[in-house]
Image (cartoon, rainbow, N blue to C red):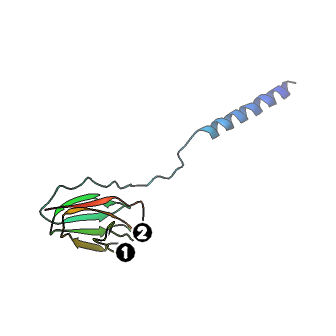
């Protein structure tokens, strides 16, 4: 009888230990190793502006320039991207790694642009003032 009780106690201890070990949570969701956060908008300048495409984001997400100046986008990702105005003002076409696209703005306004290849890359802006 003592062996039977010892066997049941030992069996229960193994089950409780197994349940406890399995119920401990660990984050198995993979996280980006170095996520990129777009930087804040630039202040209006009398010169040209540059936008990096890196980490599937436009950085800075908004630039401010004067009429007659330009913005140059540079793809620093390994994937291709576009810089495409939601209107019809500009469209870079597909930019391979290290490729650049420059557009000169001739009219004041706010231009919202996207990457046509990656829908999550949206709502970046170029603000052009007189």
**In front: 83, or 75?**
83
Q: Looking at the picture, how far across and down is residue 119, in whole percent? A: 42, 63
Q: Looking at the picture, how far across and down is residue 42, in whole percent? A: 21, 56
- The total of numbered circles placed on residues is 2
Seen at 27% across and 68% down, the residue is 73
Seen at 42% across and 65% down, the residue is 118
Q: How far apart, in angstroms, are the residues tagged by discs 1 and 2?
A: 8 Å
Seen at 57% across and 40% down, the residue is 25
Locate the C terminus by quadrant.
bottom left
Determine whether the residue tagged by mark 1 lies in a helix, strand or loop: loop
**In front: 62, or 37?**
62
Q: Residue 117 carries which label?
A: 2
Position of 19 with respect to 117 (left or right) is: right
Locate the N terminus by quadrant.
top right
Determine whether the residue tagged by mark 2 lies in a helix, strand or loop: loop
Neighbor class of circle 1 (other Cα within 10 Å; few <14, some 14-19, many 20+) is some
Neighbor class of circle 2 (other Cα within 10 Å; few <14, some 14-19, many 20+) is some
Q: Looking at the picture, how far across and down is residue 44, in whole percent? A: 16, 57
Residue 24, quarter of picture: top right
């Amino acid at each position: 009888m003592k062996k039977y009780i010892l066997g049941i106690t030992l069996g229960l201890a193994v089950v409780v230990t197994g349940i406890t070990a399995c119920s401990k949570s660990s984050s198995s969701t993979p996280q980006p190793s170095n996520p990129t956060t777009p930087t804040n908008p630039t202040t209006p300048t009398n010169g040209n502006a540059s936008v990096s495409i890196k980490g599937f984001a436009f950085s800075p997400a908004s630039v401010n320039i004067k009429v007659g100046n330009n913005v140059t986008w540079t793809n620093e990702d390994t994937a291709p991207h576009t810089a495409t105005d939601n209107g019809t003002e500009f469209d870079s076409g597909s930019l391979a790694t290290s490729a650049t696209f420059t557009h000169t703005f001739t009219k004041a306004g706010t231009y919202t642009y996207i990457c046509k290849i990656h829908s999550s890359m949206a709502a970046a802006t170029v603000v052009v003032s007189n």
